[in-house]
Amino acid sequence: MNLKDYLAASPPILMDGAFGSLLHLKKGGEVRPSFEWNTLDPELVSTMHAQYKKAGAQIMQSNTFALSSWAINHNWTTQQISKEIHLAANILKKIKGVFFAGNIGPCNTNLQKASDIYAQQLESFYEEELFLIIVETMQTQKEVEAFLKAYEKLKTDSSQLIMMANARTTAIQILSIIPESWILSLGFNCGNHPQIFLNLLEQFKSTKPIIVKPSRGIPQKNEKGELVYPISDKEWVLYVEKLIKFGAKLVGGCCGTTPETIKKLKDALTLPSP
């Protein structure tokens, strides 16, 4: 069964949670682009995928969120981008019994070059036979336009696309320019607080299934220098349950969420296996 049919038959569908914030925690606060750990510690990345699968995630994403902004800011070549996506895809596909997705994050700057960076990532994911693409944390309509320009040129009959805007007051407007005929699911991720998602879903109208991936809030450093997120797993799960009642069909986590967070959500819901 492909994801489109599975989504129609079996919502809600559980996704994985954060990678960047979790790697930051596991590596003692070391600051580097999260995709670099695909090279430096592939066993850790593989273990994290496996932990999310064990927690109940049915859709697993490549550890490539930070690649867009890094590639554009460091003038990376197509070969460099392709190499990183190949590494991430190989690690991801060790997990069995889930849907795989190539993850694309925002470019943040230099939107004139953004469409080329997005195109290079799409081509690389398709070469790895990752035809489900999840684009998240889109900040502006210009950024969405840059991605859509690349996607229009490269999409195939096998392509499936999920897009999310950063959960803030302008998020619905950002998503409004996306042709729904191209989309498997639309929605929101990150945000300063899950309550923002409830406010957005009260207003958001779409013919497509809605996806939400809230964070656990804005972290603060404790006396040990560790990032502490203000929203507990229990409170986060309660918000996501409300979001499902408001119509969310795909649910997962953003910054601060862990396999334990996703496990607690699964335990609170009745979810099928892929």
Image (cartoon, grey):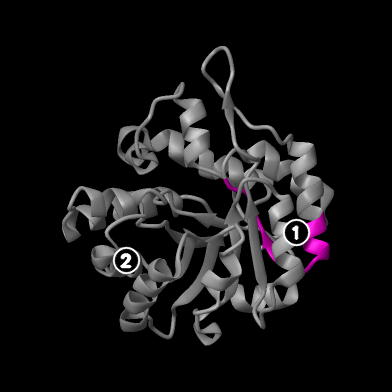
Amino acid of disc 2: Tyr
Residue at 38% across, 29% down: 31
The C terminus - image quarter: bottom right
Amino acid of disc 1: Leu
Q: Eyeballing the image, is 137 above or below 234?
A: below
The quadrant holding residue 45 is: top left
- For disc 2, the neighbor class at 10 Å (few under 14, some 14 to 19, many from 20) is many
In screen coordinates, is 46 left or right of 215? left
Q: Residue 154 appears at what percent x and percent y?
A: 32, 79
Please give the residue where the numbered disc 1 appears in the rendered image: 198
Residue at 54% across, 63% down: 165
Q: Eyeballing the image, is 101 above or below 158?
A: above
Query: Relative to the observer, which residue lies in front, 76 or 92?
Result: 76
In screen coordinates, is 36 left or right of 202? left
Say which element carries label 1.
helix
Please give the residue where the numbered disc 2 appears in the rendered image: 118
Q: Residue 95 appears at what percent x and percent y?
A: 51, 51
Which portion, as a residue range, is magenta?
A: 242-254
The N terminus - image quarter: bottom right
Label 2 – label 1 distance at C-alpha: 30 Å
Residue at 39% across, 51% down: 64
Which of marks 1 and 2 precedes in the sequence? 2
In magenta stretch: residue 247? yes
